[in-house]
Image (tube, rainbow, N blue to C red):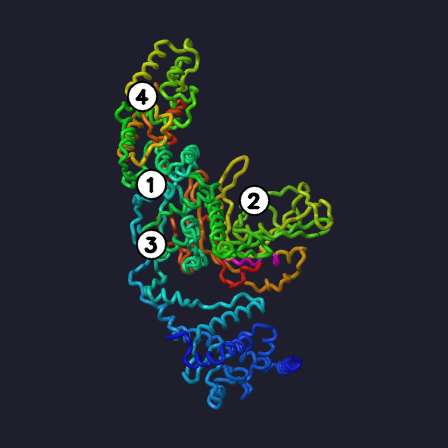
Amino acid sequence: MSDHGCIHLNNFKAAKGIQPYKVIHSFFVTSTSNEARVRKAVSCLCHTCKSYKDRLHSCLHCIFFGCYVKGHIQEHAKTKKHFLAVDLCYGNILCFQCGDYVYDRELLVVAKAQWSETAKSLSLGEFYRTWEPSLYEVELLKKNPRRRRVVENSTIGLRGLINLGSTCFMNCIVQALIHTPLLRDYFLADRHHCPQPNRCLVCEVSSLFQEFYSGNKAPLILHKLLHLIWTHARHLAGYEQQDAHEFFIATLDVLHRHCEQYSQVAPLIVKDNPHHCNCIIDQIFTGGLQSDVVCQACNGVSTTIDPFWDISLDLGPTAGSGGPSSGLSKEGGGAPTSLLDCLERFTRAEHLGSSAKIKCNNCQTYQESTKQLTMKQLPIVASFHLKRFEHSSIQDKKISTFISFPEQLDMTPFMSHRRNGNNNSAAPNGLHKNGEDAAFSDNRYSLFAVINHEGSLETGHYTAFIRQQRDQWFKCDDHLITRARLKDVLTSEGYLLFYHKQILEYGRNSKV
Amino acid sequence: MSVTNDKIQELNRCFLEFMMKPENVDSATKEIFEDLLDEVLMGFIFDIHRMTKTGSSDVEEGIPDDESYTIVDLPGLDVFGQHPVKKSQECNCPNCERGVAASRFATHLEKCMGMGRNSSRIASRRIANNSKDLTSYGGVVSDDDDDVDWSLNNDKRKRRKDRNGLKKLKQPRNANQRNGAEALGELAYGVNNDTSPSNYESMSLEDKRTLLQQICGVVSEHTKKLCTRSMRCPQHSDDQRREMRANLEILAGQNNGTVGQEVGTGLHVDVDGFEEADGQGLRESLTRWDREGSCHSSPADSTSTTSTSSVSRKRETKSKGKGKTGKRDRSSPVSQPD
C-alpha cells in the first residue's frame, strides 16, 4: 500500500518537479479556465490515430497524446522510453515500468485544488468527492480497527430520552436534530472543535451524537443540555416553558451563536446577507425569504430578503384581511387542509388595504400596495411550524384540524422566480442575473421528522416521529422508542414538520 | 490564439455539417452516450483501484462490531427489546453539583438557577453572598420542604475539622426546636445591622433591649411583626409585653451572650463543616415546627446561631404571615407526566 507513487514517479519528481503534471492537469484534465477549455477541445486527439476517445493519455515527459485502447500511448512509451503518462479523463498517472496506475499524495492535492478551480470558473458547485481519510485519520483508523456500521434494522442511532419533568418539548426537538442527516454527518465527522467545551452547546450536541451512536441502549438524561440552553437563552428558562417550536428556534440560535463565538476560524460573512454566516446551523437551516411590496399606483416593486429558520403557517380560515379582497387571491376563505394549501396561502400576494399605506420608493407617495412572500433561497432543512396554538384577545385555543402533509415535497412552486412569474413582477420567466440557473435546480424535499402535540392547550404531551435510513420510521415518546409505519406518520396531527433536501449542491450553499 | 480560433470555427462547421443528416444525429447520440458511460465507469474503477492501492480501503474496512443491534419489533417492548419501565434515574445538577432525581430535574434547575417565580430572590441573594457553598444549600433547601429531589448520599462535601463552626451549627438542635428554626431564619438579616424594628431579628441583644424600651414590641399574630406603637399601646396587654421581654432575657441567658454578638458580624460560616446529618435533622425540625404552626415567634431566639445554611429560611419565616398553606402549595411541584 502506498500513496507515495512509485520509485519511477519519485525519480521524475526529483528531476523535474511537479510542474509538468500541474500544467497538463490544469489544461487537459480539469481545464481550469476558458482558454484551457478551448485548448482541450482543439488539441485532445491521439497524435497517432486522431481519435478523441479511447482513454487518451498524455506523456508526462514530452508533448504527446495517445490513446490507450489502440495502444498508441504504450507505443510512445516504449519507443521514447517515456514511461510516465497522465490519464486525461481523471488525471491519474500510469507508470509503464510498474505496469499500473500510481497515486501520489502531493499530486492528488494538486489535482483536487484544480478541480475546485474548474468548478468555480464554470460557476458550478464543488464536484462531489468520496471521503478519503487524511494521514492523521488513517493513523486513527489503524489504531482503532473496530467499525460499527449502521445497517438496516439496527438500533444504532436510536436512543430514548428521560423526561426531566415536562421536558418532552426538548426531547422531541433533540430527536429531530439528531436525525437531521446533514447535521449527523457533520457531527459524526468530528467537525466541531472548540476551545471551551464546557460552555458550548455545540460541543454538547456533538457529544449527544456520540451517545446516540454508541450502541448504549439505556435512555439518556439531557440535564446538561437543558442547563446550557437555559443559561444561554434566559428568556425561555423556566419550568413552565413548554412550546417545542420556541425551544427549537432558541436552540438553533444558541447553537449558531456558539458556532461563531467558539470557532477558531473567523466566520465568513457572505457579503449580500449579513445574517448568513457559514456556520453549520446556517448552512443547514437558514433560507432566504423574499418580500415584494408592489405599489398599486405605479407598479414599483420594493424587494427585501430576510433570513429564516422556519416557516410558520396559519391554519385558520382566511380572514378578509382588512380591505376589500383583492383580485389576486383566487380562492376566498376556507381553512387550509394540506401543507401545500398552507404554503400556497403563505406565498400568495396579499393586499395590504387602505389602512396600511406604504410610501413607495418609486413614485414617492403613500399608496396601497400588495405584499408577497416567496422563497428566494431554500434551506437544506425546511422546517414548517403549523400554528395550532391560537392566542387571541378573546381566547386561547388549539386548532386540531387535520392538515395532510406529503412524504415528498417539491418547493419549486413557492420559489421567488416561479411565484413572481405568475405575477406582474420584475424578472420575467425566472431569468436570473447572476447566471444562477434557478430553473434547473432541484427543490425536492423528503420528510424526516414530525413533532406532534397531543392533548389540549393547558396540558399536553409532545412526541416525535423520526426517520432513520431513508424509510425506517420510529416514534420517540421520551424514553420509549418504538417502530412506526409511514402511515402513522402521515396521518398524525403534525405540529412541526421537518423536510430535508434530497439533492445537495456542494459548495453552493455559501453563495446567496 | 487565432490559430486555435480558426480551429474552433472549423470544428463548429464540421459539427453542424455532420449534424445535418438525421442518421448521423442518431449514431452521434449513441456514441456520446457510450463515451459518457465509459468515462463514468472508469471513474468508479479508478476510485476502487486507488483505495485498494493506497490501502485506505483496508483501513476503512476494519473489524466489524460483533455485537448485535437488531431492532426488536414486539408489542410491549421498545426497539431495544427492553420493557419500557421507568427506572428512577439520577443526574448531577450542573449548576449546584448535587444529585437530583432525573424526573424532577427541570423543576430543580429552575429554582437552582433562580428562574422560577420565587427563585430569583434566592438566586440574587446567593449571588450577593457569593459563596460557593451557599449555592448548594441556601437556595434550594428552603424552597421545598419535601426535599425528595435531593439525594443525600451524593453529597461530596467533606467534613471540616473546624470545631468552632460545628459547635455553632449544632446549637439550634440543642435548643428547643422552635428556637432553632427561628434562629436559622434570622441569619439572612445578619448582614445589615440596622436598628429599625423591621430588622429586629438581626440586631444584637443590646440593640434589642434598647429598642424594646421604646416600643410595645409584641409580635402581632397577623403580621408576625413587632408592634411599633408606644409602650402603652392599647392593642396589647402589659402581660404580653412582659412575656416578650422575659423571653428575650431567657434566651440571652442561654446563649451567654457570646454567640449573640457574632450575629451582627460573623456572617461567614463554613458550610463545609455542616454535616449532612445536621441538615437532615434541621430540616426535620423545621418542617415539624412549621406544621405545629407556632405563631408566637419569639424574636429573642434570634441570637442563638450563625448558621448560614438556611439563609433563605428567613423568607419562609417572614412570609408565614401571609399563610402557611400558600407556602406549602408552591413548594411541592408535582412532576407531570409529560
Sequence-first tag of 3 and 1 = 3
Residue A74 against residue A435 in the figure, above or below: below
Residue A13 against residue B280 in the figure, above or below: below
Badge 3 and badge 1 in a common chain: yes
Picture coordinates of residue A456 (x, y %)?
Answer: 44, 40
Distance between the alpha carbons at the discs numbered 1 and 2: 51 Å
Sequence-first tag of 4 and 3 = 3
Q: Are marks 1 and 2 in contact (CB under 8 Å)?
A: no
Sequence-first tag of 1 and 4 = 1
Instruction: Provide the chain ID for the residue under circle 3.
Output: B
Picture coordinates of residue A12 (x, y %)?
Answer: 46, 81
Q: Which one is in front in this view, the residue at disc 1 or the one at disc 4?
A: 4
Q: Are marks 3 and 1 in contact (CB under 8 Å)?
A: no
Instruction: Provide the chain ID for the residue under circle 1.
Output: B
The amino acid type found where label 1 is placed reads Arg
**Residue A317 image label:** 2
Identify the element where label 3 is drawn: loop
Q: Which residue is mark 4?
A: B257
Q: Which one is in front in this view, the residue at disc 2 or the one at disc 3?
A: 3
**Residue B79 image label:** 3
Distance between the alpha carbons at the discs numbered 4 and 2: 76 Å
In magenta, the rendered stretch is A408-418
Distance between the alpha carbons at the discs numbered 2 and 3: 41 Å
Distance between the alpha carbons at the discs numbered 1 and 4: 36 Å
Q: Which residue is mark 1?
A: B98
Distance between the alpha carbons at the discs numbered 3 and 1: 33 Å
Badge 1 and badge 2 in a common chain: no
Asked if residue B290 shows in the view, the reply is: no
Q: Which one is in front in this view, the residue at disc 4 or the one at disc 3?
A: 4
Badge 1 and badge 4 in a common chain: yes
